Image: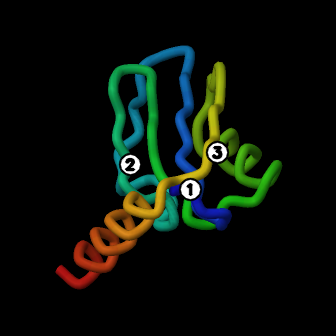
Amino acid sequence: MKIPSKLRATLAMLLAAIGTTAAMLPDDWLRVSTDGNVLEFIDSRFKDGDSQERLQSQLSGIRRIDVEPVALRTVFTSLARAVRDRAA
């Protein structure tokens, strides 16, 4: 089940490997993971157009950005992990 919301799964493909750590990225990017030149995260404050601009201001050399709705289960687990991590 997909739900309409401000939460979007975001995948960014860069021209080179990512040298940014999760600590350097916005707090509203949840479940951040990197693999070579690919960055994946859940954007908890997605706004069409603005979110892509914000991503491009955080990272240089972006080749492609893919955004899609997030499944309800992923929303729950992402928010639960974020709350747990902030409490630790």
Q: Residue furthest right?
A: 49
Secondary structure category for the residue under label 1: loop
Q: Earlier in the sequence, mark 1 or mark 2?
A: 1
Label 3: few (<14), some or many (≥20) within 10 Å?
Answer: some
- Type of amino acid under label 2: Val
Q: 8 or 20: nearer the eye?
A: 8
Identify the disc placed on residue 45: none
Q: Which quadrant of the structure image shows residue 62? A: top right
- Type of amino acid under label 3: Leu
Q: Residue 61: percent from the left, percent from the top?
A: 63, 23
Q: Which quadrant of the structure image shows residue 67? A: top right
Q: Earlier in the sequence, mark 3 or mark 2?
A: 2
Q: Quadrant of the C terminus?
A: bottom left
- Above or below, 38 against 31 in this view is above
- Type of amino acid under label 1: Lys
> Where does label 1 land, which residue?
2
> Where does label 3 land, which residue?
55
Q: Residue 16: percent from the left, percent from the top?
A: 48, 16
Task: Report the residue at 51% width, 66% height from top.
Answer: 28
Q: Residue 7: percent from the left, percent from the top?
A: 58, 61
Task: Report the residue at 36% width, 54% height from top.
Answer: 31
Secondary structure category for the residue under label 2: strand
Q: Earlier in the sequence, mark 3 or mark 1?
A: 1
Q: Residue furthest front?
A: 1
Cα distance between the residues tagged 3 and 2: 13 Å
Secondary structure category for the residue under label 3: helix
Identify the disc placed on residue 32: 2
Cα distance between the residues tagged 1 and 2: 20 Å
Label 1: few (<14), some or many (≥20) within 10 Å?
Answer: few
